[in-house]
Amino acid sequence: AIDYSKSLGCMGPGEKKYDSFSDGVTFPQPGSPISETAEVTGTPAADGSVIPGTSPVSDSDPSGLSGTAVAAFIDITKYSCPPDADCNSGIPSECKDISLAGPTGAAAKYCYKIENTSPDQNICEIEMTDPATGVTESLGCMDSGDVEYKEHNDGVTYPSPDSPVNEPATVTGKPANDAGEPLTGAEPVEDSDASGLEGIIPTISIKKYSCPAGSDCSSGPPSACDDNDLTGLAGVDAMYCYVIENTSPTLQLCEVDMTDPAIDYSKSLGCMGPGEKK
């Protein structure tokens, strides 16, 4: 009950008066609706004077309040990205939301997508933290459906192969009204998401074969070649064949150069994908 009363004086036939009261009136907790009855009384009168012998009149009417939980939700997705990825207006396809592998010690970057996924609720005092970078960033307020993109790369590098990193970033906020004021009694919202980095040590291999002259090594050394020692008549022409393989499981290698000082031979092979042979 709100324990409210007010004297309205006199009212002519058909006259209406309007009143309101708000002090301490709040929506109740979910599952505990309230329904309170207001009453009005009056005595018949003429020219402002009560008519003798008449009985008072009255009426009552209930109205209630039902509380619902604030439907406020916030979402964060963390991405691991190459250092040149531009995440200011979206997340590029080369970024990964689970884990990204790269050469140990090379630079990398973390990007973040933060979204107010509430159906119709402002969220304010939003903060994003990521212990992987030591960053805490204030995002202010976000309306329902708003999306923010952030990126951080200070000190972010691929780890050693035996020490992958996978730390979650967290976003928090408070449901708020249109003026940006947190709603009284509304619980803060929070979400976390992890994405990591895996270190890879790049590797490459070369095998040199001794072959009879005229051997076709364009698709691999033929069986007549030997990768240890080939015996032939002195003075008869011979040749060498080479198999170069990018043995890195997930890394492309570029500026691949092969040299054989025994015959003063060198060749640039350009770039090679993971597992590719030339």
Image: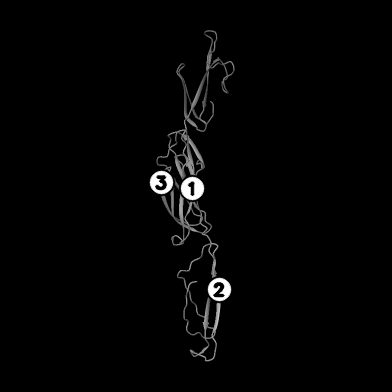
Look at the picture and state if 169 lies above or below 240. Answer: below
Residue 198 is situated, as x and y percent measured from the top left of the image, at: 48, 36
Mark 3, residue position: 135
Residue 24 is situated, as x and y percent measured from the top left of the image, at: 46, 69
Mark 2, residue position: 62
Question: For the residue labelled by badge 1, is the local secondary structure a helix, a strand or a loop?
Answer: strand
In this rendering, the label closer to the viewer, 3 or 2: 2
Question: For the residue labelled by badge 3, is the local secondary structure a helix, a strand or a loop?
Answer: strand
What amino acid is labelled 3 in the image?
Answer: Val
Count of numbered circles on the image: 3
Residue 146 is situated, as x and y percent measured from the top left of the image, at: 49, 54
Question: Real-space Cα distance between discs 3 and 1?
Answer: 14 Å
Mark 1, residue position: 192
What amino acid is labelled 2 in the image?
Answer: Pro
- Near mark 2 (Cα within 10 A), the count class, few <14, some 14-19 or many ≥20, is few
Look at the picture and state if 242 lies above or below 2. Answer: above
What amino acid is labelled 1 in the image?
Answer: Ser
Say the numbered circle drawn on residue 90.
Answer: none
Question: Real-space Cα distance between discs 1 and 2?
Answer: 45 Å
Task: Please state which of residues 120 and 88 is positioned toward the viewer in this rendering.
Answer: 120
Question: Real-space Cα distance between discs 3 and 2?
Answer: 54 Å
Look at the picture and state if 95 lies above or below 229. Answer: below
